[in-house]
Image (spheres, coloured by chain):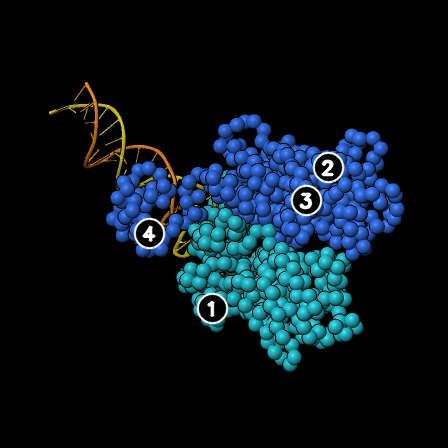
Chain colours: A cyan, B blue, C orange, D yellow
DNA sequence: TCGACATTCTAGAGCGCTCCAGAGTTTCCC
DNA sequence: GGGAAACTCTGGAGCGCTCTAGAATGTCGA
């Protein structure tokens, strides 16, 4: 910086002014400084700048590495944070690096707010964290008063799925349950409510989970039901649904003719023509935007109002669901 | 820090010593300082510490968010960097945030070295970057002298695949080509060499790519070949292979009885029992370790020797490949 | 012509840490 | 008993920036 100032024939303070893009420098010197910086291949040291400035304007984000939907969310978070004048700092959760470790590095960096994507952090830790700085739990509903929750209306999503299937004539609809996964409890509830809304439907909950493997395992249980087999299933998520479809097809059943399947998330794969999975879409862009809004509005003191948001999902009908076929009626 | 020092009745310098874990403090004061810090919920400010220290000991990593195999690599990078006494700083590449932007933030943070996972950075940019600081291109082979490359021996991988299929009696083996994807050229070459090694085999290269969708599209072309159809295919990667399998199965063909398929990567899904894909395994742990070694050895001046490494892949035989069945022989 | 007011620029005190040089203490060996 | 060596601790300069207070210069209306 010293060098740049010297080369441009100005003071260090001027260089700082130019690089921060604030007023206080003539256009002429501005270009002169920029030129000098380019010649010297200089770029401001963000660590030092954050130190000098009181605030860091950094948003810490924890996420599961390699998780497709988290990836989509990150894209949105980057864009929204940038628009709000914040910088995002990533901290990945891996099998050897838990949520706690991920959060700790973000705190040590002095992030001003945290977005935890599908975090598995324990309740008390979460609460304490929320008391320390603005925190939003993205995707995962938690009941700690100190943290905002931004999530899809999971219950509504499953109600939409069930209603869609009911509308197609299905009466025997199974749930591939997500167990303890984020949002699973709400989806289960939505499923139950959806069934209760119409008489003569009964619930069949099959243990599954959030991967294709879980869906495949559940399919084995499903096939074992023999003639009591439901004619449709609503899965915890798309990956689970895809695993299920693979296995029932290998067993000779047709999708959707013999069994209709609906997923959740609307991951990229679901839209591929050869897959064409009917599913409940989560709006990654809006989820990201709301998460950033929740934390930045607290930071900027815009509103003392509680943050958090529940985004309505949307049913995307593709070709993994169809009306109950004739032979099924006769069964 | 001031507060902690006061509470423990020592100087600020002592607190620094304790938190850096260096020698120069008695066990007694050490615990006293730690206690005071805990009471005050203090943790050192990493920005300031990096500023004060000459070096940052930070390794910048760019990667594609939501990419499963990149995720596995990140896990390994975190672990290895930690062991080498470095910290990893993530910078995601998203549809709206290109490789260049990702790298720029890492430079502004003053990372000492860079690991670019499957980066799409242009050659000249890459070269200039490599001249500025130690850079390793992970997965993507580049010919810039200034950057180290750590990758799987892609050509060998495809040779293994082809040899495996040949050993099963296949004579007509297609390649689902990866086009311009990282490593695709090498795999194509390995495929060609593998075929040339034995007389009477000819190459059938079908355009594909790196997603299930690409594999599915290639499958359509494959099916259109009718009776000239190859009896086995080697795919650019597992995702591509899985898309291919989906489509040919939907068309009534059996895998592996009618067509044997081998993938590349050995992603988690490939090992699921209902998938059980024969594939060429890339060793994520070793790739990560070598990448970290390459950049840290340059930084620590351990060796002036060139970095980079080519890791041998390993064929994992599962049940998507089998010997050429009788009816195929008669065809 | 003069003061009021912009505009452009600079000096210098931080920000929270690290680390060197050196002050005090204790240990140890001849 | 004396000095070297080892240990424990402290003061203070410095890392590269930001930002406030104020200097220097220019502009303009009365």
User: Which residue corresponds to the image point at 78% horizontal and 47% vertical from the top-left?
Assistant: B257
Q: Earlier in the sequence, mark 2 or mark 3?
A: 2
* Image x and y of residue A206, in percent: 60, 65
- The chain ID associated with circle 4 is B
Mark nearer the viewer, 3 or 1: 3
Q: Which residue was labeled with disc 2?
A: B164
- Kindly identify which chain the residue marked by label 2 belongs to: B
Quote the CA–CA distance across marks 4 and 2: 61 Å
| Residue A248 lies in quadrant | bottom right
Gap in angstroms between the C-alphas marked 1 and 2:
55 Å
Write down the residue under mark 1: A143
Disc 4 or 2, which lies upstream in sequence?
4
Marks 3 and 4 close (CB-CB < 8 Å): no
Disc 3 sits on a residue from what chain? B
Q: Which mark is drawn over residue B37? A: 4
Which element carries disc 3, helix, strand or loop? Answer: loop
Quarter that holds the C terminus of chain A: bottom right
| Badge 1: chain ID | A
Q: Closer to the observer: label 4 or label 2?
A: 2
* Mark 4 element type: helix
Q: For mark 3, what is the residue?
A: B318
Q: Can you tell which of label 4 and label 1 is closer to the viewer?
A: 1
Mark 1 closeness class: few <14, some 14–19, many ≥20 residues within 10 Å: few
Question: Of B86 and A162, which appears nearest the observer?
Answer: A162
Image: B305 above or below A55 = above
Q: Give how far apart the Cα atoms at labels 2 and 3 are.
A: 12 Å
């Amino acid at each position: 910086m010293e060098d740049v100032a010297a080369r441009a024939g100005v003071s260090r303070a001027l260089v700082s002014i130019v690089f921060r893009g604030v007023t206080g420098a003539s256009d002429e010197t501005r270009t002169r400084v920029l030129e000098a910086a380019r010649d010297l291949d200089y770029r401001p040291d963000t660590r030092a700048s954050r130190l000098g400035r009181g605030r860091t304007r950094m948003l810490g984000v924890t996420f599961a590495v390699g998780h497709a939907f988290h990836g989509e969310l990150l894209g949105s978070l980057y864009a929204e944070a940038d628009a709000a004048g914040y910088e995002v700092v990533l901290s990945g959760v891996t099998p050897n690096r838990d949520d706690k470790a991920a959060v700790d590095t973000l705190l040590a960096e002095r992030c001003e707010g945290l977005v935890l994507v599908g975090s598995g952090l324990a309740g008390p830790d979460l609460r304490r964290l929320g008391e320390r700085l603005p925190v939003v739990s993205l995707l995962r509903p938690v009941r700690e008063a100190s943290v905002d929750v931004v999530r899809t209306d999971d219950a509504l999503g499953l109600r939409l799925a069930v209603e869609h299937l009911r509308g197609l004539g299905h009466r025997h609809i199974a749930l591939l349950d997500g167990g303890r996964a984020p949002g699973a409890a709400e989806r289960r509830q939505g499923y139950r409510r959806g069934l209760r809304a119409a008489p003569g439907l009964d619930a069949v909950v099959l243990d599954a989970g959030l991967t294709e493997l879980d869906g495949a395992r559940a399919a084995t249980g499903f096939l074992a039901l023999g003639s009591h087999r439901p004619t449709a299933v609503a899965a915890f998520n798309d990956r689970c649904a895809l695993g299920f479809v693979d296995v029932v097809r290998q067993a000779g059943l047709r999708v959707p003719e013999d069994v209709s399947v609906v997923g959740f998330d609307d991951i990229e794969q679901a839209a591929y023509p050869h897959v064409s999975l009917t599913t409940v879409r989560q709006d990654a862009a809006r989820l990201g935007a709301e998460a950033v809004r929740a934390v930045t509005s607290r930071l900027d003191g815009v509103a003392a109002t509680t943050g958090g948001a529940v985004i309505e999902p949307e049913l995307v009908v593709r070709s993994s669901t169809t009306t109950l076929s004739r032979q099924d009626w006769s069964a």
